[in-house]
Image (cartoon, helix red, strand yellow):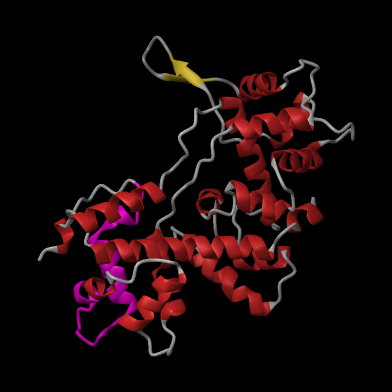
């Protein structure tokens, strides 16, 4: 029987794709998105202690006052999301890590809701101490990744100056038109912004999954160890044998890092957002591996956020 075309595998694929949506089905609020990016950029800067535009494992650990015993987890997080292989996370890689997803972001800040997040942003920029942001204060923390423009008469893009972009977003957020953004006004826009989840390349987490699942430390992952890893993530263990048959190239009854990586490369569209290759319907085993890698990345992010809970409010 060809498991790749069974109804069960097809249902599993549909479920996997539902689990990994890029964003929630919610209308995009332009000003809300700008405020959301302002918060996320400021969080990135708070992590980036040396302001070199990258966040290292050491910087993550130091922010939480974690000792060397916790550094391994931070290095695993960085390796799982470090797509360009430079040993640190740039702003895009950091955004894909899920540390900036709504729940984890609130955990990092030690707050309960958008009002708490808005208050943190105000604390970063409120130079005159009036509890709100003027246009100049907002401009000081506004994301440089926000832009707007139009198509000119010559058919080329004409981008608005940053001053206009910031003034427009500020005006759309300033509900009472008093020239100041209060915590409540910022919170309202943050609540209106959709949760946009950037999906990282989960193929990067192969080494992390292999190390975590290799219970006996023999350098390979057996069927039993795969099943244990799946159970730990509340995943169906049924496709384990299918994955072993497909990926165990040397027939030693265990999967090396190289064999797991080859399985990822066989179905790039399950692991890389927007991958152009389409090698056909994935097997149930390949879908299980994709879920294991995704859950590995998610648990790294959730655990890091929990360990750093409130750290950013302590350094604001």
Q: Based on the displayed image, in which of its 4 quarters is residue 235 positioned?
A: bottom left
Task: Name the spot of residue 66 as percent of width and height, x first.
Answer: 71, 72
Magenta span contains residue 249:
yes
Give the x, y percent position of residue 217: 43, 89
| Residue 285 figure quarter | bottom left
Q: Camera-side residue: 260 or 164?
A: 260
Could you say where residue 17 lies in the image, as x and y percent from the top left?
34, 49
Residue sticking out furthest to the left: 1
In the figure, is residue 192 to the left or right of 86? Answer: right
Q: Residue at x 38, y 61 (%)?
A: 291
Vertical position of residue 100 compared to residue 128: above or below: below
> What are the residue bounds of the magenta stretch?
244-273
- Residue at 59% in and 54% down: 99
Magenta stretch: residue 56 in it?
no
Left or right of 311? Residue 28 is: left
Q: Can you name the residue that lies furthest to the right here?
A: 129
Q: Nearer the viewer, residue 60 or 51?
A: 60
Q: Where does residue 155 sit, x and y in percent of width and height?
A: 36, 15
Residue at x-position 34% and y-position 61%? 290
**Relative vertical location of residue 95 with respect to residue 225 in this rendering, above or below:** above
Vertical position of residue 206 compared to residue 268: above or below: below
The residue positioned 48% from the left and 62% from the top of the image is: 297
* Quadrant of the rendered image containing residue 287: bottom left
Q: Is residue 222 visible?
A: no
Going by the picture, which residue comes out furthest to the top?
153
Image quadrant for the N terminus?
bottom left
Q: Is residue 133 visible?
A: yes
């Amino acid at each position: 029987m060809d498991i790749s075309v069974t109804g069960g595998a097809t249902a599993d694929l549909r479920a996997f794709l539902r689990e990994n949506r890029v964003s929630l089905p919610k209308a995009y609020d332009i000003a809300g998105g700008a405020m959301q990016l302002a918060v996320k950029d400021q969080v990135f800067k708070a992590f980036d202690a040396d302001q070199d535009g990258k966040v290292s494992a050491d910087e993550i650990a130091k922010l939480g006052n974690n000792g060397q015993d916790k550094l391994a987890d931070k290095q695993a997080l960085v390796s799982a999301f470090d797509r360009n292989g430079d040993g640190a996370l740039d702003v895009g890689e950091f955004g894909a890590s899920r540390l900036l997803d709504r729940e984890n972001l609130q955990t990092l800040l030690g707050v309960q809701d958008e009002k708490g997040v808005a208050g943190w942003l105000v604390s970063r920029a409120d130079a005159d101490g009036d509890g709100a942001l003027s246009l100049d204060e907002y401009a000081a923390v506004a994301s440089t990744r926000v832009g707007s423009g139009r198509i000119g008469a010559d058919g080329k893009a004409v981008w608005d100056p940053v001053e206009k972009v910031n003034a427009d977003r500020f005006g759309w957020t300033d509900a009472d038109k008093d020239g100041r953004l209060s915590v409540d006004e910022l919170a309202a826009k943050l609540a209106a912004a959709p949760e946009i989840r950037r999906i990282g390349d989960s193929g990067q987490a192969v080494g992390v999954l292999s190390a975590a699942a290799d219970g006996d430390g023999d350098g390979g992952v057996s069927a039993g160890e795969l099943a244990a890893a799946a159970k730990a993530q509340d995943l169906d263990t049924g496709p384990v044998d299918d994955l072993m048959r497909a990926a165990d190239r040397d027939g030693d009854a265990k999967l090396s890092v190289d064999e797991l990586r080859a399985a990822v490369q066989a179905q790039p569209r399950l692991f890389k957002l927007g991958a152009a290759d389409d090698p056909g319907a994935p097997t149930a085993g390949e879908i299980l591996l994709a879920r294991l890698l995704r859950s590995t990345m998610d648990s790294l992010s959730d655990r890091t956020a929990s360990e750093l809970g409130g750290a950013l409010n302590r350094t604001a």
